[in-house]
């Protein structure tokens, strides 16, 4: 009887711990990437989708002759003002000699995270309006749109 009670308690605790973890889907539409004098431009924005429970690995988002570009994203829940909201942090990387090197980081900021049932399902946008770059001289520049969804 003790064994059954012990196993039931473990199952209950593990269900509580793992059921609180949300699953996020991220859609990236990449239009342009540039590092120093090397760049890649996509005629139609390149579409990349990933799923995460909070922090992604570095995801390859494009390649030029000399570099591979990557992005890492973290999504966090916040109940700061008694309402559920989300904050997102992003960092961009280039791969040099087989190793990822961080070149641009956006600190965590508030972001809209929609339900997965509201996911935008249409042909890729004809242009990209989001982006960022490092300060002068511009060594890195990215033009991309990203959309965030929660499925659990």
Image (spheres, rainbow, N blue to C red):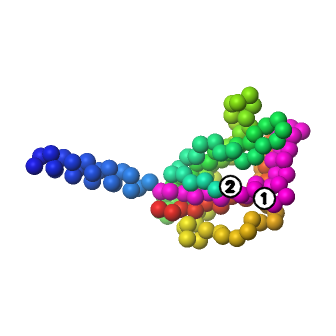
Q: Quadrant of residue 70?
A: top right
Q: Which labelled disc corresponds to residue 45?
A: 1
Check the image and report above or below for 68 versus 31.
Answer: above
- Which segment did they paint magenta? 22-48
User: Along the line of sight, which residue is nearer the eye, 76 or 67?
Assistant: 67
Question: Which residue sits furthest right?
Answer: 37
Q: Is residue 86 left or right of residue 13?
A: right
Per the picture, the main secondary structure of the magenta-coloured stretch is strand
* Residue 136 part of the magenta segment: no
**Coordinates of residue 132 in the picture (x, y in percent):** 78, 50
**Coordinates of residue 128 in the picture (x, y in percent):** 79, 60
Question: Which residue sits furthest front?
Answer: 65
Check the image and report above or below for 7 versus 96.
Answer: below
Check the image and report above or below for 100 versus 25.
Answer: above
Number of numbered markers: 2
Callout 2 secondary element: strand
- At x 82%, y 35%, the residue is 66
* Residue 46 part of the magenta segment: yes
Q: Can residue 110 be seen in this snapshot? A: no
Give the residue pinned by disc 2. 48
User: Along the line of sight, which residue is nearer the eye, 44 or 141?
Assistant: 44
Callout 1 secondary element: strand
Question: Which residue sits furthest left?
Answer: 1
- At x 55%, y 71%, the residue is 117
């Amino acid at each position: 009887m003790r064994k059954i009670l012990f196993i039931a308690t473990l199952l209950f605790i593990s269900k509580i711990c793992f059921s609180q973890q949300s699953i996020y889907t991220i859609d990236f539409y990449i239009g342009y990437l540039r590092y120093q004098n090397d760049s890649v431009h996509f005629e139609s924005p390149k579409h990349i989708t990933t799923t995460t429970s909070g922090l992604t690995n570095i995801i390859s988002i494009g390649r030029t002759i000399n570099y591979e570009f990557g992005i890492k994203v973290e999504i966090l829940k916040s109940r700061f003002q008694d309402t559920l909201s989300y904050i997102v942090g992003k960092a961009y990387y280039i791969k040099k000699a087989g190793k990822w090197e961080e070149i641009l980081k956006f600190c965590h900021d508030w972001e809209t995270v929609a339900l997965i049932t509201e996911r935008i399902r249409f042909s890729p946008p004809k242009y990209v309006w989001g982006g960022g770059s490092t300060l002068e001289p511009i060594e890195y520049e990215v033009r991309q749109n990203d959309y965030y969804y929660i499925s659990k």
